[in-house]
Every structure is written in structure tokens, then in C-alpha cells.
């Protein structure tokens, strides 16, 4: 298994997409950190003030957590890319036990997610802490439960990586999977999670569960508690991974 | 019991795609120490058969063994058989050398194996460039280099001469014959008869997924006026024009 994970990392690092995704994650983090600070106290009901605990939690969760979907895209690109570039045959010739390959892919992007999350957290803190200090708001990284939020961000981005790998293994079509995933996360899910009459089940949807985990609070959206959200989000990732392994095991590589 | 090491045995192999029977109760063997040509018209089921041999396509009935057991159950499949399926199967943005190193890592070979097979296939210089810029012949060589990584007992190749220039074909012939001379098994598919006549000692001919004839090339063509005449007479279907269905078989 270690060999397979090392091979997946070698695949990841020998094409440049990982770097572009890292730059995009960094850009997202800087943009949202800056926006939340610039709009502080002007956001009305959109986000709580950054002098409050809730405001600081939202700042960390939304800014650093933005890497999650990008890591999922990276995972889909690699896993489904095996079919697009027809490398799947060589991969399964080297390792005929295909479920092990899918497991290695899922673990690889879990670990990659941890790396991307840590990078984004560093960027987030480097931008936010001095800026807020200049405004007289002193944020303690380890106080106010902030450390817990940052840990949740790491878990969230890692689980997004697992989800991308599982989806890529289940659907095999790189472009369709990325498109469907982004439309779901940024269009469909925000729409339905704001409908109050659906609040009995919308917190359990993957992206909303992830927001519950990190407590990325948005007005009008019902979230689960961090623990419940985290478990729900992880359950989605495991379900997608199992589906990916099952589909991959029975696909004829023609 | 027959010595199984490196022997390819196909027995009763059958595969349907929807209503089309691609491979129909096919049985044959390829022996160590020889180059066996696997022949048939386009769409005869050659590619599907080779893919079933190594577990990429699951047969509906029958089975195949390499060295006495199924490829997919081997503890070290890359040492069992090296497989060249098509001159594709590379990420365009990855260098040939890195492509090989990925599979060195997956199979637990030292990374230096990548440089050795690059040298063996004449790609040492090109190896550091991205595959995007490779010609068809270079991709074919890289596919062969990938197959050679595990120094396997058996080589299975699907249309390996596609895209090679005459010099490349001569080089391939030497490589395959040298491989067989060292007591290993070479099975390659082709629909280019001159190539088969140059390369193979034994042939297996299929048509419409069924076995048509198998045996030593010399025996098959003795007194028949060359492989082409034998092939055409064996694979001709009454009233049939060239079958549709493109290149993939």
C-alpha cells in the first residue's frame, strides 16, 4: 500500500497541475481573507464582526477552507485522468488489485489535502493577523476555539480530497465530474441550503456538512455541529470511495 | 505436467459486448522460447483477447493463464508479463522518464530501472522531455519500455509495430527475437502480414473471435504461396466485404 501511495504522489508531483491548484488555493485564501477584513462591520448580516469569536471562526473557516473544492478538483483530475489519458491500463497492469489502487488514490488525496490546508492556513494567518492587529483586533490563534476551527479546516480539505478521488474513480469522466461537482457545490447546494423549508435535511448534504465541520457560518443556512458535520462529511467521502472502488473493480479497460 | 513457466494458455475464452460476441470460445497456447504472431482481420477480437489475458477485460467464460496462473493473482505481475497495448497511455504533461518512474515505484523496482529501459529502447535523450512532444514511434518505444520494466518472462504486445519506421521495425524484430532466444515467451498481435512473416515463428489466426488456425508459420505456409494467401483464404467470409468497425479489434 505504501508503494501505491508513493506512486500516486509521484503521479501528482510529475505534472504541473498540483502547482496551479496550490496557487489558486493561495489566491482564494488571500482574496477571502482580504474581503472579510475589508467588509468587517459593513457586512450587516452577512458575517459576524471579526472582533467576535464567531467572526474569527468564520474568517478562518471560509478563507482557508476554500482550498477544499480545489483539492477535490485536483483529485478528480488525477483519478479520472487515468481514463482520459488511458494510463488506467498500465496502472492496473502494475497493480491488478484495483480496489487497492482506489484506496491508495483516496489516501493520497487525503494527505495532499492536509498539505494544501496547512499551506492555506499559513497564508491566511500571515495576511490576517498583522492586518487585524493594525485595526486593534488581536486574534489569538490558540484562543477562542480558533485552534479547533483550524484543525477542522485541515480535516475538511483532506476529506474534500478523498471525495474528489472517490468521485473520479466512480465516474471516470474528468471534465463531466469536475463540472458537475463545481456546479453542485457553488450553485445547487447554496440555493437549496438557503431554503428554510428544507432545513430538516440540507445540513446533511456534503458541502453543508463540511461547513458544519468548520462552522463556516452563512446567514440563512442551517449547519450541523462540528462533530456531527465532520462525521457526516466523512461518511460521504467513505461512500464515494466505496462506490469508486466498486465501479473501478468491474470496469472493462478497453 | 508440462513446464508452465512463461507459457501462455488460453482456454475457452469468451466475451460479449452487448449482442456482439467479440471472442468466442477461443483456445490456444504460446510457448516459451518462441515468438508467436496473433493474427486476424480488424475486429476479429485480438485486442479483447490480449486484454482478457492480463485481466483488463473480464471474460464472460473461459480463462487464461500465464506461467500456470492468472495474471491478476500474481504477486509480482510486472515480472510475470510485460504488456504493450497501444501507443497511448501516457499523460502528455509527464516526461517519459517520470512515466516509467511512477511504475517503478508502484511495482517496487529501483528507480534506476527507468533509465535502463530508456536506454534499451533508445529513448535516453527523449526521456526527459514531456510525452506531448513524442512521435508515434517514440510513444510505441515508451510503451515497450514500460513493458520491459519488470524484465518479465512473457511479452504481450498489441500491434507493436504501428508507427515504427523500417529501422524501428528492424530494431523491434531484433529485440523480440532476442527475448525469445533467451527462453522467454513473446506473443504479439498484428494485421500486417509482412511484419508477422518477419517476426514470428508460430502463428495463431483468429476470425470473428474464433480460432481459425494455429501452428508453426513454416508449416502453415508450406506450399501455399506465402502467409497472405493462407490468411486470406482462412479468414475470408463468404460474400463478405471488408468488415466495418474501425481499427480496434
Image: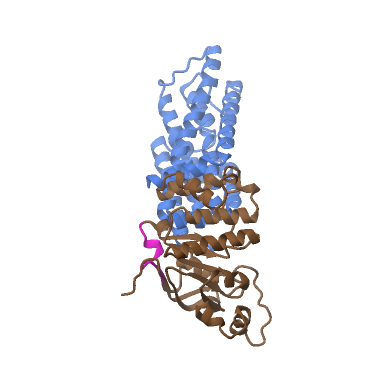
Chain colours: A blue, B brown
Please tell me in which quadrant of the rendered image residue B140 appears. bottom right
* x, y percent for residue B57: 48, 66
Please tell me in which quadrant of the rendered image residue A195 appears. top right
User: At 60% across and 54% down in the image, what residue appears?
Assistant: B139
Front one among A191 and B173:
B173
Front one among B154 and A166:
B154
User: At 40% across and 62% down in the image, what residue appears?
Assistant: B72
**Magenta region:** B64-75
* x, y percent for residue B162: 62, 63
Q: Is residue B209 left or right of residue B181?
A: right
Front one among A163 and A195:
A163
The answer, for residue A205, to whether it is visible in the render is: no
Q: Is residue B67 magenta?
A: yes
A33 above or below A97? above
User: Image quadrant for the C terminus of chain A?
Assistant: bottom right
Front one among B70 and B18:
B70
Q: Is residue B178 left or right of residue A142?
A: right
* x, y percent for residue B30: 45, 72
A227 above or below A81? above
* x, y percent for residue A91: 48, 54
User: At 59% across and 23% down in the image, what residue appears?
Assistant: A34
A58 above or below A165? above
The answer, for residue A145, to whether it is visible in the render is: yes
Amino acid at each position: 500500500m505504501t508503494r501505491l501511495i508513493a506512486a500516486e504522489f509521484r503521479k501528482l508531483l510529475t505534472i504541473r497541475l498540483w502547482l496551479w491548484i496550490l496557487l489558486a488555493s493561495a489566491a482564494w485564501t488571500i482574496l477571502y481573507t482580504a474581503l472579510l477584513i475589508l467588509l468587517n462591520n459593513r457586512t450587516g448580516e452577512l458575517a459576524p464582526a471579526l472582533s467576535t469569536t464567531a467572526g474569527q471562526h468564520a474568517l478562518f473557516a471560509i478563507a482557508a477552507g476554500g482550498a477544499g473544492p480545489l483539492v477535490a478538483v485536483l483529485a478528480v483530475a488525477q483519478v479520472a485522468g487515468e481514463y482520459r489519458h488511458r494510463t488506467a491500463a498500465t496502472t492496473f497492469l502494475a497493480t491488478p488489485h484495483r480496489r487497492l489502487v482506489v484506496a491508495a488514490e483516496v489516501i493520497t488525496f487525503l494527505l495532499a489535502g492536509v498539505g494544501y490546508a496547512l499551506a492555506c492556513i499559513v497564508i491566511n494567518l500571515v495576511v490576517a493577523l498583522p492586518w487585524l492587529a493594525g485595526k486593534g483586533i488581536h486574534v489569538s490563534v490558540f484562543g477562542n476555539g480558533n485552534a479547533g476551527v483550524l484543525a477542522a479546516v485541515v480535516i475538511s480539505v483532506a476529506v474534500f480530497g478523498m471525495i474528489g478521488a472517490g468521485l473520479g474513480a466512480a465516474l471516470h469522466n474528468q471534465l463531466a465530474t469536475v463540472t458537475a461537482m463545481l456546479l453542485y457545490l457553488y450553485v445547487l447546494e447554496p440555493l437549496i441550503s438557503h431554503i428554510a423549508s428544507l432545513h430538516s435535511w440540507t445540513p446533511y448534504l456534503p458541502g453543508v456538512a463540511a461547513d458544519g465541520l468548520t462552522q463556516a457560518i452563512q446567514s440563512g443556512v442551517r449547519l450541523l455541529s462540528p462533530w456531527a458535520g465532520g462525521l457526516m462529511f466523512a461518511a460521504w467521502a467513505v461512500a464515494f470511495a466505496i462506490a469508486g472502488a466498486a465501479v473501478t473493480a468491474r470496469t472493462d479497460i478497453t | 505436467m508440462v513446464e508452465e513457466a512463461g507459457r501462455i494458455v488460453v482456454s475457452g475464452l469468451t466475451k460479449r459486448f452487448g449482442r456482439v460476441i467479440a471472442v468466442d470460445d477461443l483456445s490456444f497456447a504460446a510457448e516459451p522460447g518462441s515468438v508467436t504472431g496473433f493474427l486476424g482481420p480488424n475486429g476479429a477480437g485480438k485486442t479483447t483477447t490480449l486484454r482478457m489475458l492480463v485481466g483488463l477485460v473480464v471474460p464472460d467464460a473461459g480463462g487464461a493463464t500465464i506461467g500456470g496462473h492468472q495474471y491478476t493473482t500474481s504477486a509480482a505481475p510486472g515480472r510475470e508479463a510485460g504488456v504493450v497495448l497501444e501507443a497511448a497511455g501516457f499523460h502528455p504533461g509527464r516526461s517519459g522518464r517520470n512515466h516509467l518512474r511512477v511504475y517503478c515505484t508502484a511495482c517496487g523496482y529501483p528507480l534506476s530501472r527507468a533509465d535502463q529501459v530508456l536506454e534499451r529502447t533508445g529513448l535516453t535523450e527523449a526521456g526527459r522531455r514531456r510525452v506531448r512532444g513524442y512521435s508515434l514511434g517514440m510513444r510505441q518505444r515508451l510503451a515497450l519500455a514500460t513493458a520491459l520494466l519488470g524484465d518479465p518472462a512473457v511479452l504481450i504486445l498489441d500491434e507493436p509495430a504501428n508507427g515504427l519506421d523500417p529501422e524501428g521495425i528492424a530494431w523491434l524484430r531484433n529485440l523480440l527475437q532476442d527475448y525469445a532466444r533467451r527462453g522467454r515467451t513473446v506473443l504479439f498481435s498484428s494485421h500486417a502480414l509482412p511484419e508477422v512473416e518477419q517476426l514470428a515463428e508460430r502463428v495463431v489466426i483468429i476470425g470473428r473471435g474464433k480460432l481459425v488456425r494455429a501452428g508453426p508459420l513454416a508449416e502453415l505456409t508450406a506450399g501455399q504461396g506465402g502467409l497472405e494467401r493462407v490468411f486470406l483464404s482462412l479468414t475470408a467470409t463468404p460474400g463478405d466485404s471488408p468488415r466495418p468497425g474501425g481499427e480496434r479489434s
